[in-house]
Image: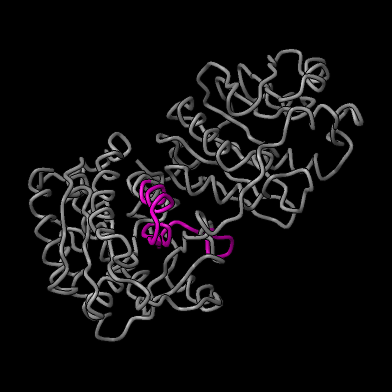
Amino acid sequence: MVSFDHRAPGTDPDAWTPVLDRVDTAPIALDGYDRVLVVAPHPDDETLGAGGLIAAAADAGLPVHVVLVSRGEGSHPDSPTTSPEDLSVRRAEEFRTALLALHPTVTWSVLDVPDGGLREQPETLADALADHLSAEADPPGAGRTLVVAPWQGDGHRDHRVAGEVAARLVADTPDVDLLAYPVWAWHWDDPVAPALPLARLRALPLSSAVLDRKRRALDAHASQVRPLSSAPGDEAIVDDRHARHHIRDREWFVDVRTDSATTEPTAPSRSRESFDAHYDRKPEGWDFDGSWYEQRKRAVTLAALPRRRYRSALELGCATGVLTAALTERADAVLGTDISRAPLERARRRAPSARFVQAALPTEWPDGRWDLVVMSEVGYYLSPADLDVTIDRVLASLDDDGVLVACHWRHPDSDAVTDGDTVDAHLAARWPRPALVRHVEPDFVLSVLPGPSVTSVARAEGLVR
């Protein structure tokens, strides 16, 4: 389930044009590959995200195979005219017709994972991709493979999991590269402060002939681009406005190769000893009380909370408890954690109604369920692996109506493992739904990441339907 609404107008496709025109990137060169393997969570993802690449690669004589994860039977859950069983048959046939329109030599396979169910059986996709990559590598040195899969931050759960599975396999397989395609991000993302990593975007120029075949392939997905009927619940999923994001003379991908073998080894998470030494020098840690920057950032953080009141709040890295004290005015129960023991004594005096435990993330995770988790100025002290586990633990312990609020400093920090922008992008990529709030300014970035039943404040109050 995702928190954006495909029926909403979404981001104007024209708003992306000047942003993409400013992206300085070398075009994708397909002549360095011997074959292409495409992952499509649902029928039409392959066309929207990579239809031009599929057609161009096949034109160049490369074998192209598309792995379809599900038949997309869940696209119209409120349809009064068409059952999921009927949609499954219809969309599978549309998928085959679309691939023929792109190029008649394209091959495909269908995994029949339930629509929306890839998180529960990622090994089905992992095994299928491993089999394809293993067969293509036989004999050894048989050439280079390009894997094309959804971008992990696209905002749809199936897209995220498919992207994660592909990234893990590519990282462990020699002579394989990965490009990730956005689908829904163009619809919900903000071109002014995008979650899409513009610095890692790469473009594939499309000839007029290839673009025309992509148009015909998209038109073949009739159940998605046209209403099933005039009844409510039968609306088009990919209307003309949304389709314009994808019918451009360039197809855009995120280059994921820099996430694996080409990256430098990362430092481990910042140690407990280093924090203890910091509090020995500065018992109050940072100037949380006196700094106007800290006061204002705290006010922005609290203002971003979409509910007036929470049942149970968890603050990760609470330090001396200044923000914790403010959270006790918004939540019935508050638990603060910190890796170092020293600041917790001050925190207990500052917020006597809260509970505090000493815990190192992510291994020493507190028991409980939460409808509010706050991660302020913590993520960039964690290694990428520890940040991944922390995000997974938040997701596992967050109630459906809960949110994660993440706020991070954007300037260099010599004690940090990464930086605030990297943490925010990583959260966006791994979180199964797009941010409800994303506030970016020169000094810090703040994101509110929702659980599956969270909606906008106005919608929750009945001001909009």
Residue 172 spot, x, y in % from top left:
41, 49
Q: Name the residue rendered at 86%, 28% in the picture.
A: 279
Q: Residue at x 47, y 60 (%)?
A: 257
Q: Considering depth in this image, is 287 or 239 the residue closer to the camera?
A: 287
Q: Position of residue 410 (x, y in %)?
A: 71, 52
Q: Nearer the viewer, residue 144 or 229?
A: 144
Residue 373 in magenta? no
Residue at the spot 90% in from the left edge and 31% down from the top edge: 282
Residue 378: where, in percent of width, then height? 68, 37
Q: How is the image coloured?
A: one colour
Residue 383 in the image: above or below residue 16: above
- Location of residue 140 by image quarter: bottom left
Position of 69 with respect to 201 (left or right) is left
Q: Is residue 409 above or below residue 274?
A: below
The quarter of the rendered structure image containing the N terminus is top left
Q: Does the rendering let one see residue 25?
A: yes
Q: What residue span does the magenta drawing correspond to?
A: 165-194
The quarter in which the C terminus is drawn is top left
> Would residue 452 be found to the left or right of residue 382 on screen?
left
Q: Would residue 377 be found to the left or right of residue 245 on screen? A: right
Q: Is residue 150 above or below residue 344?
A: below
Q: Residue at image x 20%, y 40%?
A: 114
Q: Is residue 304 left or right of residue 256?
A: right
Q: Quadrant of residue 98?
A: bottom left
Decide if residue 214 is in sight here. Answer: no
